[in-house]
Amino acid sequence: MRRVLANVSDDRLRQIAQLKYGDPEHTTREIAAKLSIPHGTVTVKLMRFRAAIRRELCRALIEEGVA
């Protein structure tokens, strides 16, 4: 996750991911309230972030010859 976050240029996405997956973990509704943004924005950004993590993991597995 840190590798993907390091390559994220969207500051808002970085904030959302850190709140969601940090310690303590926040719910999407808590994140939306804390950052004063719509709940839908939080969920969409998290979906895109998880997709980026999947792509990074797949790329790493292919490079290692595991996949």
Image (tube, grey):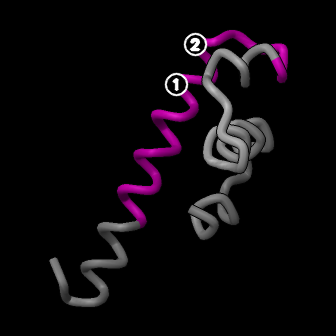
> At 45% across and 45% down in the image, what residue appears?
50
User: From the viewer's perspective, is residue 5 above or below residue 11?
Assistant: below
User: From the viewer's perspective, is residue 50 above or below residue 43?
Assistant: below
User: Which residue is labeled 2 in the image?
Assistant: 40
Identify which residue, 60 or 24, lies in the foreground: 24
User: Which residue is labeled 1 in the image?
Assistant: 44
Locate the N terminus by quadrant.
Answer: bottom right
Q: Find numbered disc 1 in the image and state the secondary structure of the residue it sits on.
A: helix
User: From the viewer's perspective, is residue 31 above or below residue 54?
Assistant: above
Is 54 placed left or right of 18 in the picture?
left
Identify which residue, 27 or 37, lies in the foreground: 27
Identify which residue, 52 or 24, lies in the foreground: 24
Q: Amino acid at mark 2?
A: Gly
> At 54% across and 23% down in the image, what residue appears?
43
Q: Find numbered disc 2 in the image and state the secondary structure of the residue it sits on.
A: helix
Locate the C terminus by quadrant.
Answer: bottom left
Query: Bounds of the magenta span?
Result: 34-56
Residue 54 inside the magenta-drawn segment: yes
Res. 26 image quadrant:
top right
Cα gap from disc 1 to disc 2, whole angstroms: 6 Å
Res. 39 image quadrant:
top right
Residue lying at the far left of the rendered structure: 67
Is 51 placed left or right of 3 in the picture?
left
Spot occupied by residue 5 in the image (x, y as percentages of width and height) = 65, 58
> At 46% across and 33% down in the image, what residue appears?
47
> At 57% across and 31% down in the image, what residue appears?
45
Q: Are marks 1 and 2 in contact (CB under 8 Å)?
A: yes
Crowding at mark 1 (Cα within 10 Å: few <14, some 14-19, many 20+): few
Spot occupied by residue 6 in the image (x, y as percentages of width and height) = 69, 65
